[in-house]
Amino acid sequence: MALTKTQSRTAAAVTGALPTTMRALVKERPEPGLVLKRVPLPRVGPTDVLINVRKAGICGTDAHIWDWDKWSQHRVHPPLIVGHEFMGYVAATGDAVRAVKAGDRVSAEGHISCGVCLLCRTGQEFICEHVQIIGVDRDGCFADYVAIPEHNVWKLDPAVPDDWAAVFDPLGNAVHTVMAAGVSARSVVITGVGSIGLMAIPVARAAGAARVIAIDLNAHKLELARSLGADEVFDARTPGLREKIYALTNGDGADVLLEMSGSGAAINQGLSMVRNGGRAALLGLPSDNVSLDLAENIIFKGLTVLGINGRKMFETWYQMQAMLTAGRIDLSKIISHVLPLERYAECFTLLKEGRAVKIVIDLTNKDG
Amino acid sequence: MALTKTQSRTAAAVTGALPTTMRALVKERPEPGLVLKRVPLPRVGPTDVLINVRKAGICGTDAHIWDWDKWSQHRVHPPLIVGHEFMGYVAATGDAVRAVKAGDRVSAEGHISCGVCLLCRTGQEFICEHVQIIGVDRDGCFADYVAIPEHNVWKLDPAVPDDWAAVFDPLGNAVHTVMAAGVSARSVVITGVGSIGLMAIPVARAAGAARVIAIDLNAHKLELARSLGADEVFDARTPGLREKIYALTNGDGADVLLEMSGSGAAINQGLSMVRNGGRAALLGLPSDNVSLDLAENIIFKGLTVLGINGRKMFETWYQMQAMLTAGRIDLSKIISHVLPLERYAECFTLLKEGRAVKIVIDLTNKDG
Amino acid sequence: MALTKTQSRTAAAVTGALPTTMRALVKERPEPGLVLKRVPLPRVGPTDVLINVRKAGICGTDAHIWDWDKWSQHRVHPPLIVGHEFMGYVAATGDAVRAVKAGDRVSAEGHISCGVCLLCRTGQEFICEHVQIIGVDRDGCFADYVAIPEHNVWKLDPAVPDDWAAVFDPLGNAVHTVMAAGVSARSVVITGVGSIGLMAIPVARAAGAARVIAIDLNAHKLELARSLGADEVFDARTPGLREKIYALTNGDGADVLLEMSGSGAAINQGLSMVRNGGRAALLGLPSDNVSLDLAENIIFKGLTVLGINGRKMFETWYQMQAMLTAGRIDLSKIISHVLPLERYAECFTLLKEGRAVKIVIDLTNKDG
Amino acid sequence: MALTKTQSRTAAAVTGALPTTMRALVKERPEPGLVLKRVPLPRVGPTDVLINVRKAGICGTDAHIWDWDKWSQHRVHPPLIVGHEFMGYVAATGDAVRAVKAGDRVSAEGHISCGVCLLCRTGQEFICEHVQIIGVDRDGCFADYVAIPEHNVWKLDPAVPDDWAAVFDPLGNAVHTVMAAGVSARSVVITGVGSIGLMAIPVARAAGAARVIAIDLNAHKLELARSLGADEVFDARTPGLREKIYALTNGDGADVLLEMSGSGAAINQGLSMVRNGGRAALLGLPSDNVSLDLAENIIFKGLTVLGINGRKMFETWYQMQAMLTAGRIDLSKIISHVLPLERYAECFTLLKEGRAVKIVIDLTNKDG
């Protein structure tokens, strides 16, 4: 784990009664699996904040790292503490930290941008080319403590429950996608209702969508989609589905596509359902190249296609906070499990077997 | 009333069992008052549609014409049938009409654009410089029949009640203002809750506003505003109101101002409540010049100020339809009276004495 | 050739000294080739304009129709007069025509929109789903006369030479693409410098591009590209070309891609050269599906990809006129040949053998 | 002068052979005038950069501070080193500085934003409510050395001459205004051609304006405006000027207004010249309230009015750099004088008597 120059001090220099070691879920070696073990507390630089993690969400990316798939082998360099979705309390601050103080209840943006490139300097740091992601490129949050630049810390509104604050990262993906697409008074098709696709349903409703149509292959998820506010839900394999969508949208096609599956088939199906002049926001990451009928589905239609990555720093966070504090979004049905850190293996099993929607790890039982 | 070349034929040429005369509320002479009398049916050109009016909304503009105020004296040329908000059924069509047919249940855009200027040819015909407004510049809809170009006709969705369809014109003003401002996940201040300001409340909520704050001088309207979904309502004379708005918006100020009063004091107050980088949409029409602190309230703040006129033709109509058919807007509390045409004098009295919110004239009792 | 209801009258009804027959380049049968023959003048409906064609541009689409390729077999229904780029003088007008009169010097938009769909009613008629294109879906302009709705006619500024006015259709494609992408103060890569790609170079310069880089396989076209104002030109096969583009753009990548080739390889290469957060406007039409690395080239990058079709009606036309009358664009180097109608076969040969850039057919020699 | 926490170290801690005192132009007491004197070098915090100033531009704001006008009395707290436009070389860096190093040739954004408010965290730090401006709220650049946060430093391209780099602040105002308005293929009216208004002319041309019309009261400035690329120039008092502008813009009115004067009369005149649906960007700061015909000039017209403040950080800087390195802008005619620091009194006299356009102070003669 390469540390930046400003992370060269130990926590000891900046804190008082902190423990010297902590629990952490670690990818120790380049092979499948994760290990729960005690490790030293992270070092805290002058512009960093040390956060005592209370709740942390498990993401599909974490499962990829557990599995040590092709992507992980290429990207991740063990040893590494995994995890990037979390909330907690500030335990200590570096001496150049200005606006965050010990005791603050916080979540954080896990994308550490470089701060000096074109993108960082033009309000687009969420797509900084030199980004480092916690739990992927540097130590993450499946641990009692995580260190992160003050710049990345988000102070929580008291109205937001801990479990919801723990999943601001994926909720932010949903909010970013919905807001980039623009859904006010529009009909919206969502392809893929995994946990982010499901979150996108109440988010799109809160953001003003006039009609939300969810498409997936999983009947259970579609049922959940409906209970979260989808006006219509469809199995992607329904015969004549494109025509049904057109019939539901006055024969014009949907105004907006939110692609949340990363499946090539879903991308093509989704694009075929968007009306001329419509907008498609792509968040789901295909693992391979996708063959597209560009002429028919994008060019003739005059479509606008948006690649969506991460969360706008920090416009998305303000939007998320506005929706949550206004009571427009309810995540309780999406967080299916809250389990203590020690049961981490069970969490990954539940997730990989499709028996969970969103799992939150609880780190409050000790060491907090 | 100057007719265009295409309006040179009589209805006789295009219809069957139509009566030869009809009831109409007419400004006969350049003086206060209106007269209910029988007049010939309007002539219908080849690209025109003749509509049997069922319900029609009364607007403040109609009251100005009744009063024969300065603006009316300058703009209106009697004799003229007044009224511009309505719904009804198509009775006859000119022979070049292509997509509307007798029996269609319709409303219509009352701004007749020229069709050939820069604005008409670039999707901005709602601000056509040569616009003619029905009930102002040419015969209007407070009559059993009105003739209007096919281009301006809007076919109604069966889900929309007649009384609501009769007020698509002012509802469209509200939708246009809200959508131009952009309210998704934003805090919104509305200054002035007359009938359009009141409509803007459910519209802003439907369009995704995270918080709606209504400001007016009329306690009854503010109460109604709250019942329509305003999160907070304030008397404009409340001491320290600007600070209260800032406190409600994390100290930043409101993201968006929707100015619906036309009062100079309200415009200044509203602008002072918008945050740096915010947006202000001005719909209310000041009767005189307004003195503004441009440096403090617009330039230093980096504000975007939008002049709003009419309804986008026909983007606003599609948005309005989407919101209504999705059941996101309820107008029942705003339409305070539905009265037959013969009681027109009572309608204007109610309106001018501030005892009504929105009055719909019912023309179905006879002659329909 | 299916005529609309309003095209049911003969020209005889509306004109005086017109001939009864005219020259026309016709696809007579479903097979390769075109035939120059005499045919009756087109019928002119009440809202139509009859134009005496003086100059007409040949497009790649015309060559496809000559060749009777797969696309043509599917789309075109002989007999049909081909050609869709032209200028001329108004010879006659239908009796409901309001703003165009005999003698006007005009060009015209060849996309005949339906006028009543969602897109036509929201300022996006250029992507009307029911569009009919002259020379493809209904009779075109390689003839002494062509009939077209008044709505589609564009009056020419005297400052625009005939030969340039004849190619407003492809020039409009270039202007639409450049303006949709937004090039002010940005670095622009153009992939594919056929005639539209070449036009895009001075257009991008006129629209404010800070740097224009042209990429193609044809050395002659690249040389022409440079003479038209490209700051850098590259053979697409240059080793390490992506790195060279990054080096030319401060290591960030190009701000904007204008894809004008329709080649899958060029689309992938072009997308790889755009910086994070950049914009790509796709005008070139791939003949087959294209395999894209969506994750790497669009999603992670946060790219905005725009499908571009036709010309905005008529925003693009106003922009084109503004650039031309300001003297910011010079097309003389792009129009390589002006040949009389009788030499049509030679024109198609020159075009297909790559010996011409843009060919204009001259119809003024007789019958005009 | 209130120093932030991070400015608590002396330069001595971070540099080698620096002098201990320097020349500085200082507002010593709350009264008219400035004093050239020797003062200690500024203190440099861990995230700060110490810059050896070579060239510095004089702004109207500096003249206001000299005069000790009402605004200055309210805003400025002596003692203060004035000046905010400059270029120079990095002399030393704080120990947390990451991307800037001694010897770098730089300019800098003089607006020091707080970094933690809503605006700073959403890409709009140029309108940070807590902004501090160098030379106004904290020590400025009319001195041999100035300290500024690394965040604000802009590394210069070698292609940009020193004198031009010294005026990036006002040039950035012009670029920000032009780019916010959007001028590609549009007609542009500029009201007020002081030094920023003059800069806006080549900037608008470079950004793609199709026609630039300059309006002022000063014949010499208008002559200069024409030589800088204005297509038309007018004395604001020309009878029938509004009609002339409409005649020059096909009877529609100008697409865009760039208001650079701050004069109420010019603002009203300028707004009256913009077409329906047009855009007006206001940069000039009125000293008092301005009375506007909102109904006629903004609301009915459907105008978009933009308040413009400072420069986008740092999008404007990238745009400015792109235009300059592409050779699209030439500032030589605008910089009328380059004079040594010791002749500062003469500079202010020239400026106040209207005998200069833009004056650059040269600090290279000694102490550099």
Image (cartoon, coloured by chain):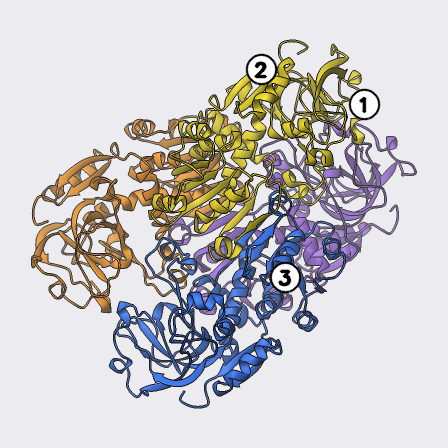
Chain colours: A orange, B yellow, C purple, D blue
At label 2, counting other C-alpha atoms closer than 10 Å, the crowd grade (few under 14, some 14-19, many 20 or more) is some
Name the residue type under label 1: Arg
**CA–CA distance between discs 3 and 1?**
49 Å
Quarter the C terminus of chain B occupies: top right
Callout 2 secondary element: strand
Check the image and name the residue furthest to the right.
C17
Q: Determine the residue positioned at 68% across, 16% down.
A: B144
Report, in whole angstroms, how far the alpha carbon at label 3 lies from the one at label 2: 54 Å
Which residue corresponds to the image point at 85% horizontal and 51% vertical from the top-left?
Answer: C364
Rendered position, B211 above or below D286:
above
Residue C333, image quadrant: bottom right
Q: Quadrant of residue D126?
A: bottom left
Q: Secondary structure at mark 3?
A: strand
**Number of marks:** 3
Q: Which element is circle 1 on?
A: loop
The residue pinned by badge 1 equals B9
- Which of labels 2 and 1 is toward the front? 2
Residue A123, above or below A184: below
Using a 10 Å C-alpha cutoff, classify the residue at mark 3 as few (fewer than 14 neighbours), some (14 to 19) or many (20 or more): many
The circle drawn on residue B68 is none
The residue singled out by tag 2 in the image is B339
Check if mark 3 and mark 1 are on a common chain. Answer: no
| B137, B295: nearer the viewer | B295
Q: Position of residue A228 (x, y in %)?
A: 32, 30
Which dot, 3 or 2, sits closer to the camera? 2
Q: Is residue C310 visible?
A: yes
- Identify the disc placed on residue D190: 3
